[in-house]
Image (cartoon, rainbow, N blue to C red):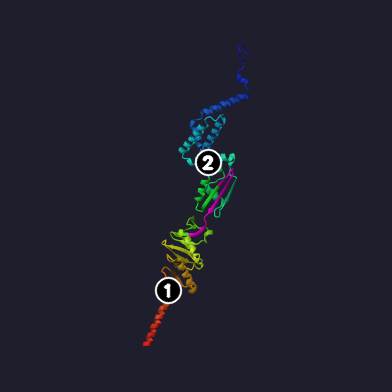
């Protein structure tokens, strides 16, 4: 140092080279940050997804709460965060996405606290598989038992046409029990050339016919789906007609026709159904009615059975009648001679 307390050399020469480089680098970095236009920063923020923004907001909030010694202003902070996030979701048209994210975040927190669903007991499913039941109930791999609404899950299950009733029980801390009662496939219902699988109460179970249900009885016509159970119950007392039946046709929502596999149609009356069916069976036993060359057996009139011959049988009958008349005419001519 000189007499005035000054150094003989500059401090730039005394400082290490590494320190000087670090200082220069820091200045350059700060300079670049200062030079970054605001539009670029806005574009980076806009590029973030709604979930990423909410995640950043969540972490910042957690950091703020962690530094709060006595929890002062926690409620106000959470309220502000919820309002801000909801406002942003509403403005951006992402309400559904934001709600799903919050639910997932809530369930994750509850699972971390020990309320994860560790076992699920299902019972009663026959046509539905395990995945179908859980999907209908709204249970996913991240669903927390703590926030699962059993009433809502039961309503979701019973909204399915296959499920007549359901029970959902939560057994803390991590067990879930679901019991369902399925409707039984009863018949196939055809209306306007569309065939569906129905239950005994007329509920449409499937709008198409899977291969495993092709053996079910077929009922046809408007209103047939709700009246089929009562009719088929009566028809079941007469296996001679039930087994060869191809379809039961509900006519004008008042009465039934039976279409047999051999093409024969049996027209039944609106009333006294049991009596008419018993009469058809009796005639078949005594006169082989259902095996004859006829196309229609009309039982609509009381105490009267009307049959319609097939085209071949009708022509043969006409030919036989014509031949008989011709012979009768020739016979009269011979007598006159």
Q: Quadrant of residue 142?
A: top right
The residue segment tinted magenta is: 169-188
Residue 145: percent from left, percent from top: 56, 43
Q: Position of residue 316 (x, y in %)?
A: 43, 76
Considering the whole magenta stretch, tell me its main secondary structure. Answer: strand
Foreground of the two, 32 or 187: 187
Q: Residue at x 42, y 74 (%)?
A: 315
Give the percent coordinates (x, y) of residue 76: 50, 32
For label 1, the residue is 314
| Lower sequence index among marks 2 and 1 | 2
Q: Nearer the viewer, residue 123 or 128?
A: 123
Q: CA distance from mark 2 to mark 1?
A: 75 Å
Q: Is residue 150 magenta?
A: no
Q: Residue at x 57, y 26 (%)?
A: 26
Residue 26 in view, yes or no = yes
Label 2 sits on a secondary structure element that is helix
Is 187 included in the stretch rendered in magenta? Answer: yes
Q: Which residue is mark 2?
A: 103
Question: Contact (CB < 8 A) between labels 2 and 1?
Answer: no
Q: Quadrant of the C terminus?
A: bottom left
Q: Is residue 144 above or below residue 77?
A: below
Q: Secondary structure at mark 1?
A: helix
25 is higher (above) or lower (below) than 186: above
| Quarter containing the N terminus | top right
What is the quadrant of residue 308 in the picture?
bottom left
Q: Residue furthest left?
A: 336
For disc 1, the neighbor class at 10 Å (few under 14, some 14 to 19, many from 20) is: some
């Amino acid at each position: 140092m000189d007499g005035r307390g000054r150094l003989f050399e500059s401090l730039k020469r005394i400082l290490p080279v590494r320190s000087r480089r670090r200082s220069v680098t820091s200045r350059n970095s700060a300079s670049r940050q200062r030079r970054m236009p605001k539009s670029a920063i806005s574009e980076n923020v806009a590029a973030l997804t709604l979930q990423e923004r909410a995640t950043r907001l969540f972490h910042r909030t957690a950091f703020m709460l962690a530094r709060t010694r006595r929890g002062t202003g926690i409620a106000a902070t959470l309220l502000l965060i919820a309002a801000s996030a909801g406002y942003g979701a509403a403005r951006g048209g992402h309400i559904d996405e934001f709600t799903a994210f919050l639910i997932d975040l809530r369930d994750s927190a509850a699972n971390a606290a020990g309320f994860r669903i560790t076992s699920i007991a299902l019972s009663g499913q026959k046509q539905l598989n395990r995945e179908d039941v859980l999907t209908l109930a709204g249970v996913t791999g991240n669903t927390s038992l703590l926030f699962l609404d059993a009433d809502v899950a039961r309503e979701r299950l019973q909204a399915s046409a296959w499920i007549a009733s359901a029970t959902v029980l939560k057994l803390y801390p991590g067990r879930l029990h679901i019991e369902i009662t399925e409707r039984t496939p009863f018949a196939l219902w055809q209306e306007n050339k569309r065939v569906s699988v129905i239950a005994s109460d007329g509920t449409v179970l499937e709008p198409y016919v899977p291969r495993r249900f092709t053996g079910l009885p077929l009922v046809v016509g408007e209103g047939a789906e709700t009246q089929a159970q009562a009719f088929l119950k009566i028809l079941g007392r007469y296996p001679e007609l039930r087994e060869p039946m191809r379809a039961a046709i509900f006519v004008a929502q008042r009465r039934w026709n039976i279409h047999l596999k051999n093409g024969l149609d049996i027209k039944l009356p609106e009333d006294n159904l049991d009596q008419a069916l018993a009469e058809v069976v009796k005639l078949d036993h005594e006169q082989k009615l259902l095996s004859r060359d006829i196309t229609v057996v009309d039982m609509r009139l009381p105490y009267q059975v009307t049959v319609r011959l097939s085209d071949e049988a009708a022509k043969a009958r006409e030919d036989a009648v014509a031949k008989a008349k011709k012979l009768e005419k020739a016979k009269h001519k011979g007598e006159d001679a």
